[in-house]
Image (cartoon, helix red, strand yellow):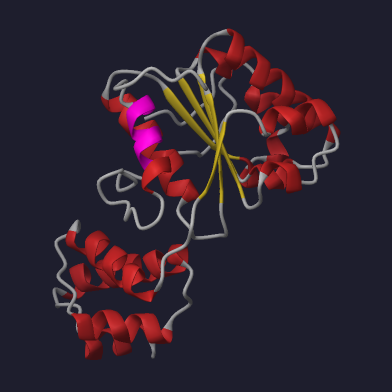
Amino acid sequence: MISNNPHQIPLSVGLRDDATFENFLTYQNLQAKQLLENISGGLTEQDNQYVYLWGISGSGCSHLLQAACNRIEEQGGQGFYLPLDGLMAYGPEVLDGLEGMALVCLDHIQAVAGDPAWEQALFHLYNRLRDNGRILVVAGNQPPRQLDIKLEDLSSRLSWGLVFQIKGLDDDAKMEALRLRARGRGIELTDEVLLFILHRSPRNMGQLFAILDRLDQASLTAKRKVTIPFIKHTLGW
């Protein structure tokens, strides 16, 4: 797992071990998932070395980017995941040298849109990766042309290649995603428990998974099953 950039800038960026293609509920996003799975696993040649994903918060873009990095590292390659919304303080120098990576995944690109220094750095990184035959995957909360990018050359390049909207899950699919994530941790959640969680919590998948993390830790500490009374006690619902 790669947690520091090639120039040793101290970044606390890591990949979630549970961010895999296997536990990503495909829903309406099969084509995007299969493409990233194939190119990060070396299963197919990819003429378009650049892919752009966009979707609302919690739709699954970050999961897919991290899954791609996890997969390429499993294959012995080097993947690099950078959530740009958490790296503004480090400056665009964090992008230096990334053209040596087989796969670079840049998340939350909207965070640096409109910043001249970051836009120039992204533009040059894009070109270096393309020239070196590397794969770049970018994710944002809007289609590339709707980002507040001021540098026209960068704006046009972000529209090249394949663009996918990652669509959020409906309630039934959210329940299945929670069940799948919980099962991976050895927790079996009944439909009654899943409905209880869903009806009393935010519908954003990131927040739902954070709730599951709390329940998992609490159940391990208390050595108790995750039941409705346990959830009420743990979360104060």
Could you say which quadrant of the image residue 52 lies in? top right
The residue lying at 80 percent from left, 46 percent from top is 148
In the rendered image, residue 22, in percent from the top left (x then y), is placed at: 25, 46
In the rendered image, residue 164, in percent from the top left (x then y), is placed at: 53, 44
Give the vertical position of 8 relative to 25 (above or below). above
In the rendered image, residue 53, in percent from the top left (x then y), is placed at: 54, 43
Count of all numbered marks drawn on residues in the image: 0
Q: Is residue 15 visible?
A: no
Q: Is residue 83 left or right of residue 233?
A: right
Q: Quadrant for the N terminus, please.
A: top left
Give the vertical position of 88 relative to 203 (above or below). above
Residue nearest the observer in this picture, 195 or 30: 30
In the rendered image, residue 186, in percent from the top left (x then y), is placed at: 14, 61
Residue nearest the observer in this picture, 216 or 177: 177
Q: Is residue 37 magenta?
A: yes
Residue nearest the observer in this picture, 155 or 81: 155
The residue lying at 34 percent from left, 34 percent from top is 37
Give the vertical position of 80 relative to 229 (above or below). above
**Which portion, as a residue range, is magenta?**
33-40
Q: Is residue 184 visible?
A: yes
Could you say which quadrant of the image residue 87 lies in? top right
Please identify the residue farthest to the top as the structure is shown. 132
The residue lying at 14 percent from left, 77 percent from top is 225
Q: Quadrant for the C terminus, please.
A: bottom left
Q: Is residue 131 left or right of residue 121?
A: left
The residue lying at 32 percent from left, 20 percent from top is 42
Residue nearest the observer in this picture, 101 or 54: 54
Give the vertical position of 103 relative to 143 (above or below). above
Give the main secondary structure, helix, strand or loop, of the magenta stretch.
helix
